[in-house]
Image (spheres, grey):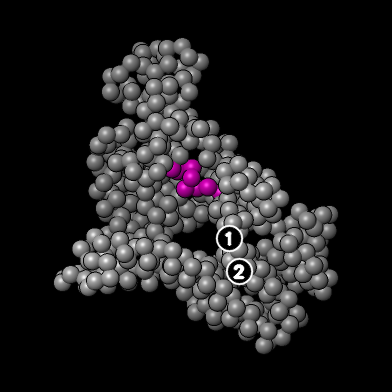
Amino acid sequence: MAVWDELIGQQRVGEQLAAAARAADARVTAESGAAAPAAPDGHPADAADPPSNSAMTHAWLFTGPPGAGRTTAARAFAAALQCVSPDRATAGPGCGFCDGCHTALVGTHADVSVVATDLLTIGVKETRELVRRAQLAPSGGRWQVIVVEDADRLTEGAGNVLLKAIEEPAPRTVWLLCAPSLEDVLPTIRSRCRHLSLSTPAVEAVAAVLVRRDGITPAVAESAARAAGGHLDRARRLATDGRARERRAAVLRIPLLVEDIGGCLRSAQELVEVAADAAKERAEELDEQETEEMRTALGAQPGGRMPRGTAGVMKDLQERQKRRATRSQRDSLDLALTDLAGFYRDVLALQLGAVADISLLPCADVGEGLRRIAEDSTAETTLRRIDAIMECREALERNVAPLLALEAMAVTLRKP
């Protein structure tokens, strides 16, 4: 299976990256003095003609909505750049099976660095370490590849540090930045990157992946894919995790509960609790394992006391876990608000007669609630409610107290 098969519903992007990987492979082959690669038709290329590098560049920016597969595309490209398959001259780099592809995909390749933060920001210190690494020649692979999964979380200072490295790249270094949109990246950085925009995969494509890879029944897979709006990871969680389905159901009940001020306040509190529950579940998955691994690394015996001089290290770990929990709760709240906005978008579709079959809507599993809200309100009211949800999301990004922001939103959602 080629690495490009991981790009669900992104054929155009896959073709562009495959062309860039071929150009990059030709360049490395020419610089190393190895035999010229064969052309895609199987005939030997003219060794006198220099390889064309117009498809390749040293800095890339992948953008797209959540679930579009920005990180998947970047990792697949990183693997293709490190491909050492003997058939890459005819089939193209990115076989998915060779040592270069496999280690890049699983995260153990010495020349592929992946930066993924679960904190609020990526600071100057971390970015300087990346820049230092980017200046090194590949230790064993064909390229030094730096993947920044959350380029939108770079602080201004970190962005300026990164800009210097992109402006003066090392000969064999490639930067792969991922962000939701162009506006989330400093203008000076995005102007120096080749931009690839990914779109949300079709529901049918996501459902097919769930059936093929996870063994989920077609009906459940399609329902989960539709509810997740094409977001593969979310669809997989909804299809396999009962608690995730319960949290989503609790969010979609909110429009039916905001009948009065009391209901608005209770609904806001429930949203906070839903987000806290999701964040706690994730923390339980990570914190215990992380803490035990740190204790073992520091020489603590199972169930015993920590060695002297290690208290500061454990305290730093706990602080990091607290910051991660804050980010996780914010992300969970944003996901809940996205589901809530999706509910009202489906209501609007019914009010405007834009859909004939309610079963095709993402929130079809709460169809009766959609009909009730659509009949009891106007399209103008629905648009006002969607605006209130978007304003709440922006308020949370500005660090407004979550409960306060949600209460203000819930009051706007109630029936006029």
* Residue 354 visible to an observer of this rendering: no
Q: Main secondary structure of the magenta part?
A: helix
**Up-down: is 300 above or below 207?**
below
Residue 173 lies left or right of residue 279; in this view the side is left
Tag 2: Cα neighbours inside 10 Å, few (<14), some, or many (≥20)?
Answer: some
Task: Give how far across and how far down residue 320 sits, in percent.
Answer: 34, 68
Q: Residue furthest left?
A: 308
Task: Give how far across and how far down residue 56 sits, in percent.
Answer: 42, 33
Who is closer to the viewer here, 359 or 184? 359
Element at label 1: loop
Residue found at x 64% / y 79%? 267
Residue found at x 44% / y 38%? 77
* Residue 266 visible to an observer of this rendering: yes
Q: Between tags 2 and 1, which lies in front?
A: 1
Element at label 2: helix
**Up-down: is 59 above or below 413?**
above
Q: Quadrant of residue 66?
A: bottom right
- State the quadrant of the C terminus: bottom right
Measure how far apart labels 2 and 1 are at the Cα level.
10 Å
Asked if residue 211 is among those painted magenta in the image, a careful observer would answer: no
User: Residue 247, which numbered label?
Assistant: 2
User: Residue 241, which numbered label?
Assistant: 1
Residue 308 lies left or right of residue 414; in this view the side is left
Q: Which residues are magenta?
A: 68-75
